[in-house]
Image: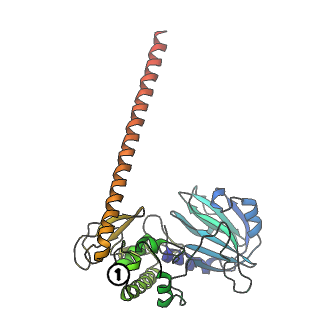
């Protein structure tokens, strides 16, 4: 799923292309792409409106209109945005199209149909999104905002329980960080993904703060990580060539040359060096028990899947035998 650097890249690529364009019509081929699944209401809200700005909030592309509203586009796993001439060939995976008065389209292509587009209000004075309502996620501060200081980061950490990796993925804690950059920031800070938040010392907090901002900043400069389906209007990114932890299972650590490990944390693949990112002694027993429970759960799930697959094969074989028997009876008669 595109994270903060990828979404920032998409917004920057779109800005010179669509700011000033007027939306004249909307085409929706998959109504559930809309957060409220109401194409007529969506079209009525945006048709005739001019685009005045394009930005980003967390993992959302934000397209500001010339009234008190803005479009938010969550690309999710396979969403892609392209600006093309209206005469460009149709694509069966395009779920939503904004038609502009100048004969161009903004097309949302989304193979797996997880992307979502919404219309939200903006504050009349500040122009910022009003982040409330049933279709707007609760979002934490932007990690690259100048107001996001080390002091604010420490205040957010105080009183938090749980483990570092799940906390970094919590969008209500800090907005925009996902699986890729959580792994990279924790590796850079030499902090284990399963380290307890309460065990962090001031030096640990400082390293993590700096690592988050450094990694995200570099990823934006490199146009994000083009892994799986991510691409931007101006093309792919190159940050995937600089990743030192994410998806490098078994490869040598760039610091100590021991193999990078892959763990499952909260259902997400997590990559780390267990030597460079060592757990403090107080966390080791609890984490070992946590990993054993997770491994047992995965084994149980695998057994369940195997049993279900075996039962399905038995059912199909029985159905085939019944069909063959009916055919044989029919041939005799």
Residue 33: x and y in percent read 63, 60
Residue 209 is at least partly visible in this image = yes
Residue 68 picture location, percent across and down? 74, 78
Q: How crowded is mark 1: few (under 14 residues within 10 Å), some or many (20 or more)?
A: many
Task: Say which residue appears at 37% left-offset and 54% top-offset.
Answer: 297
- Residue 278 in view: no
Residue lying at 24% horizontally and 72% vertically, measured from the top left: 252
Position above or below: 196 against 149: above
SS at mark 1 in the image: helix
What residue occupies the far left of the structure in this picture?
257
Question: Looking at the image, which is closer to me, 183 or 54?
Answer: 183
* Residue beneath disc 1: 188
Against 316, is 275 above or below?
below
Viewer-closest of 132 and 40: 132
Q: Give the residue furthest to the top.
A: 333
Toward the viewer: 110 or 32? 32
Q: Position of residue 160 (x, y in %)?
A: 47, 77
Q: In this view, does 206 lie to the left or right of 31?
A: left
Residue occupying image coordinates x 45% and y 74%: 161
- Of residue 243 and residue 161, the one placed in the foreground of this image is 161
Specify the color scheme.
rainbow
Residue 184: quarter of image:
bottom left
* Number of residue marks: 1
Q: In this view, does 145 lie above or below 286?
A: below
Task: Return the x and y of residue 236 as percentages of the image width and height.
Answer: 46, 72
């Amino acid at each position: 799923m595109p994270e903060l650097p990828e979404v920032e890249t998409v917004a920057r690529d779109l800005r010179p292309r669509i700011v000033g364009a007027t939306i004249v019509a909307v085409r929706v081929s998959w109504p559930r792409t809309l957060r409220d699944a109401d194409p007529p209401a969506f079209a009525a809200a945006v048709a005739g409106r001019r685009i005045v700005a394009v930005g980003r909030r967390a993992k959302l592309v934000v397209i500001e209109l010339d009234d008190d509203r803005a479009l938010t586009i969550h690309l999710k796993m396979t969403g892609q945005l392209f600006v093309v001439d209206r005469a460009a060939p149709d694509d069966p995976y395009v779920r939503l199209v904004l038609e502009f008065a100048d004969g161009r389209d903004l097309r949302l292509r989304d193979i797996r149909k997880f992307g979502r587009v919404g219309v939200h209000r903006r504050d009349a004075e500040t122009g910022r999104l009003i982040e409330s309502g049933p279709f707007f996620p609760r979002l934490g501060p932007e990690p690259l905002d100048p107001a996001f200081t080390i002091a604010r980061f420490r205040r957010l950490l105080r009183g938090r329980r749980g483990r570092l990796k799940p906390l970094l993925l919590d969008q209500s804690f800090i907005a925009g960080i996902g699986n890729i950059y959580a792994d990279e920031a924790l590796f850079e800070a030499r902090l284990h993904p399963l380290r307890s938040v309460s065990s962090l010392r001031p030096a640990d907090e400082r390293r993590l703060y700096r690592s988050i901002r450094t990694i995200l900043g570099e990823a934006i400069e490199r146009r994000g990580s083009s892994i799986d389906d991510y691409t931007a209007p101006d093309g792919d990114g190159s940050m995937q060539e600089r990743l030192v932890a994410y998806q490098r299972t078994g490869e040598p650590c760039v610091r100590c040359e021991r193999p990078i490990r892959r763990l499952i944390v909260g259902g997400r693949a997590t990559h780390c060096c267990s030597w460079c990112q060592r757990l403090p002694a107080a966390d080791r027993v609890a984490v070992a028990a946590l990993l054993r429970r997770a491994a047992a759960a995965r084994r149980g799930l695998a057994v369940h899947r195997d049993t279900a697959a075996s039962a399905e094969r038995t059912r199909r074989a029985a159905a085939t035998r019944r069909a063959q028997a009916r055919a044989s009876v029919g041939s005799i008669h």
